[in-house]
Amino acid sequence: MGKRKYQTARVNRFDWEALAEEVEQQRIIVGIDVAKEKMVACVFDEGEAVLKTVRWSHPAETGELVALIERLRESAAKVSVAME
């Protein structure tokens, strides 16, 4: 079986405010695929549907991602983060 292709958005070019409004008072999960430099994360809703897939460079943009997840915590009922 071949690799599955999916589209990602750059972490700093995505409308996080719109996502924060979309997930207001919901429980969400941020699943992070940990790598040495090129990282990817998916944001899932309560039904485990993928809302957004983002990518960033570690360590240069990791702080920005953390700040954006903190922004989601302000509007969502609960934010869980899982790393693999």
Image (cartoon, rainbow, N blue to C red):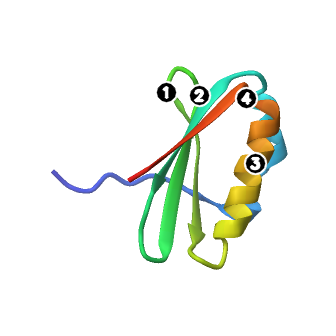
Left of 19 or right of it: where is 3? left
Tell us which disc is closer to us: 3 or 2. Answer: 3
Left of 65 or right of it: where is 8? left
- Say whether disc 1 or disc 3 marks the residue closer to the N-terminus: 1
Q: State yes or no: discs 2 and 1 in contact (Cβ < 8 Å).
A: yes
Q: Label 1 sits on what residue type?
A: Glu
What SS does tag 1 mark?
A: loop
Cα separation between marks 3 and 2: 16 Å
Cα separation between marks 2 and 1: 5 Å
What SS does tag 4 mark?
A: loop
Q: Label 3 sits on what residue type?
A: Glu
Residue 70's disc number: 3
Cα separation between marks 3 and 4: 13 Å
- Say whether disc 3 or disc 2 marks the residue closer to the N-terminus: 2
What SS does tag 2 mark?
A: loop
Number of other residues with Cα within 10 Å of mark 1, as a class: few under 14, some 14 to 19, many 20 or more: few
Question: Which residue is drawn at the image coordinates 57% and 22% (left, top)?
Answer: 46
**Residue located farthest toward the left when viewing the structure as drawn:** 1
Give the residue at mark 1: 48
**Is 50 or 34 nearer to us in this picture?**
34
Give the residue at mark 2: 45
Rendering coords of residue 79 (x, y %): 64, 35
What SS does tag 3 mark?
A: helix
